[in-house]
Every structure is written in structure tokens, then in C-alpha cells.
Amino acid sequence: MKLEEFDYYLPSGFIAQKPIKPRDRSRLMVLNRPRKKIKHKIFKDIKDYLKKDDLLVVNNTKVLPARLYGFKERTKGRVEFLLIKSIKDKYWEALVRPGKIVHSGTKIIFGPELEGIVESKNKEKGSYFIQFNFKGNFKEILNKIGQMPTPPYIKEELKVGNDYQTVYAAQDGSIAAPTAGLHFTKSLLGELAHKGIEIVYLTLHVGRGTFEPIRALKVE
């Protein structure tokens, strides 16, 4: 099977730029495989397709405000960092735009509370390693000056950071949301539990792989 067989035209106007409220009013497509029938419902109707003693497994990872904007100390050139992995204390791997203007030893100023030195480049992955310098709590600084790393097809800046979190997000570590879970509300989860559906949580952080294109021409 060729990858191009999955291509289709999607008008940009069909891509929602902000979530519907309440979020469980989003649309749900239900596929009846035996009958090869499709129904269009709203997400809240998912409770009608789950029954007592079913097990619902959800991902409680939490998205970091991992997008940082700064400037090079020497030239004042503006740069964007997307933190993708904490290596050790104050030392992170990041994607950088534009990467061509950043080199080992470049000092980046992100604000009065945070600066960093670019240490090296991972040529295989195209990422960079940066050593941060700051006073205080890094998580608090990140929550203050960082932005949510929304997908490139979302053009509008989020007004409320929690719009890009699931209602059960608990464990920091992702650079993108587990989007299938964004449609659940606390009320809907309560209804499911009341119906006798067991809900369990696991943590699977979403990393840089979610931004990687599929490079294989055949996907069989």
C-alpha cells in the first residue's frame, strides 16, 4: 500500500482553531464494521457505546508550555526553542528555529529570569542541546514565559492554556496533547463511572515523534 493512497483534500476552513465548549459537544464518528455503516454523533454519546464492566484506558500526561522565544545576546536575532527532552538538571534537548543561525556557544536570552547557552547539535536528529541558567524554580519560570506547543495547523494563539490539556492531565512531560482525550469532560467521566465503566490512567508522554513526517513511500 502506498502512502499517497491516504492523501485527501482538507479545506483549511474545516480545521477548528479553538475547542468547542463544552468539549464533549464535539463530533463523534461511529463505525459499525459488520454492517459497514457510519453514524455521526456527538462525543458525549460515547457512553451509549460503552457498557458496564468495560475498561476505558486514558493517558494522563500533561503538556508542558515548552515553546520558548528568545534572542541571541550578541546579534539580538530572534529564535524559537521547542523543548523536547530533559537530559539532566538544567540541560535540555530542543528543536530550534531558525537553526542555521544558532551555533555552539551561542547565548540566548529568554527573559530576565532565564537564559541559556547552546552546547552542541545532534546532527542525526537535527536538534540542539542547551544549558539553562536561572534562579528559582524552572517549572514555575516555564509556566510563566513558555507557550503551549500547538500543532502548525492551529494558527490562533490559545487564550486559555488548559484548552490544550485533558481534564485529567497530571504528569508533566509531553510536548503535544494526547488529542483523543481532549473531548472528555469531568461530567462525562462521572457518567461513565456511574454506569459501571472502569477508568484507568497510564502515563505515555508525547514526544517529538508526533511532529515527524512519515518518510516511507510504502506503509505495508
Image (tube, grey):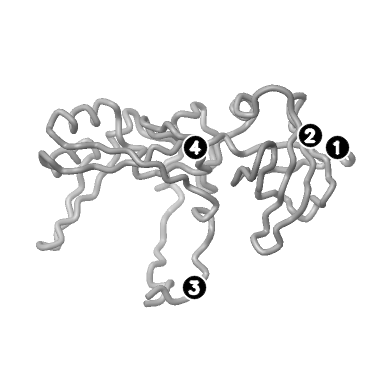
The residue to which callout 1 is attached is: 73
Q: Quadrant of the N terminus?
A: bottom left
Q: 81 left or right of 209?
A: right
Measuring from the top left, give residue 169's x and y in whole percent: 41, 33
The residue to which callout 2 is attached is: 109
User: Of marks 2 and 1, which one's residue comes earlier in the chain?
Assistant: 1
User: Of marks 3 and 1, which one's residue comes earlier in the chain?
Assistant: 1
Measuring from the top left, give residue 7's x and y in whole percent: 41, 66
Q: Residue at x 52, y 41 (%)?
A: 150
User: Of marks 2 and 3, which one's residue comes earlier in the chain?
Assistant: 2
Measuring from the top left, give residue 151's x and y in whole percent: 51, 46
Q: Residues within 10 Å of mark 2 (few under 14, many from 20)?
A: many
Residue 31 lies in quadrant: bottom left
Kindly give the residue lying farthest to the front in the view shown.
Answer: 88
User: Of marks 1 and 4, which one's residue comes earlier in the chain?
Assistant: 4
Q: Secondary structure at mark 1?
A: loop
How far apart are the two marked residues, 2 and 1, measured between alpha carbons?
6 Å
Callout 1 touching callout 4 (CB < 8 Å) = no
